[in-house]
Amino acid sequence: MNQIFDEKTIRKELRIDAKGLGIPSGAADVFIDKTIMVAKQKIKSKKIITQNDLERIITTELKKYNADFAYVYENRDKII
């Protein structure tokens, strides 16, 4: 199944995660903007990228700003 890089959906998911962690919206927006920018740069040169690749790129970048934020994103579908 082919998927496209849906920036709007990723931003929405990240905002939900940030809100759940109590990260102030201004800080969350900065983290998200920087993360999306880096992800776009890294996938721009690739012809094919998997969902796991994209999630790994986003998680790695989020860890630079907030480890809990990265953990929640990385385990998004696994947390109960």
Image (tube, rainbow, N blue to C red):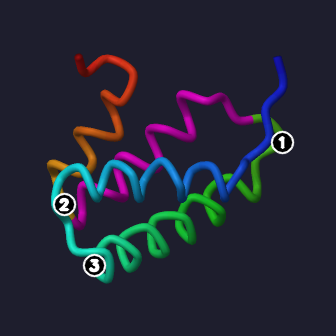
- Between disc 3 and disc 2, the foreground one is 3
Three-letter residue code for mark 1: Lys
| Foreground of the two, 73 or 57 | 73
Height in image: 76 above or below 62?
above
Question: Could you tell which of marks 3 and 1 lies nearer the N-terminus?
Answer: 3
Q: Quadrant of residue 29?
A: bottom left
Quadrant placement of the N terminus:
top right
60 inside magenta stretch? yes
Three-letter residue code for mark 3: Ala
Task: Look at the numbered discs 3 and 1 and tell me whether their residues touch, using CB distance below 8 Å.
Answer: no
Q: Is residue 71 left or right of residue 55?
A: left
Task: Look at the numbered discs 3 and 2 and tell me whether their residues touch, using CB distance below 8 Å.
Answer: no
Quickly name the residue at label 3: 27
Name the residue located 57 percent from the left edge and 50 percent from the top edge: 10
Quickly name the residue at label 1: 47
Q: CA distance from mark 1 to mark 2?
A: 30 Å
58 inside magenta stretch? yes
Quadrant placement of the C terminus:
top left
Question: Could you tell which of marks 1 and 2 lies nearer the N-terminus?
Answer: 1
Three-letter residue code for mark 2: Asn
- In the structure shown, which secondary structural element does the residue marked by tag 1 occupy? loop
Name the residue located 15 percent from the left edge and 48 percent from the top edge: 68
The span picked out in magenta is 49-65
- In the structure shown, which secondary structural element does the residue marked by tag 2 occupy? loop
- Between disc 3 and disc 1, the foreground one is 3
Residue 66 numbered tag: 2
Question: Circle 3: is it few (<14), some (14-19), or many (20+) Cα within 10 Å?
Answer: few
Height in image: 54 above or below 45?
above
Task: Tell me which secondary structure the magenta stretch mostly adopts.
Answer: helix
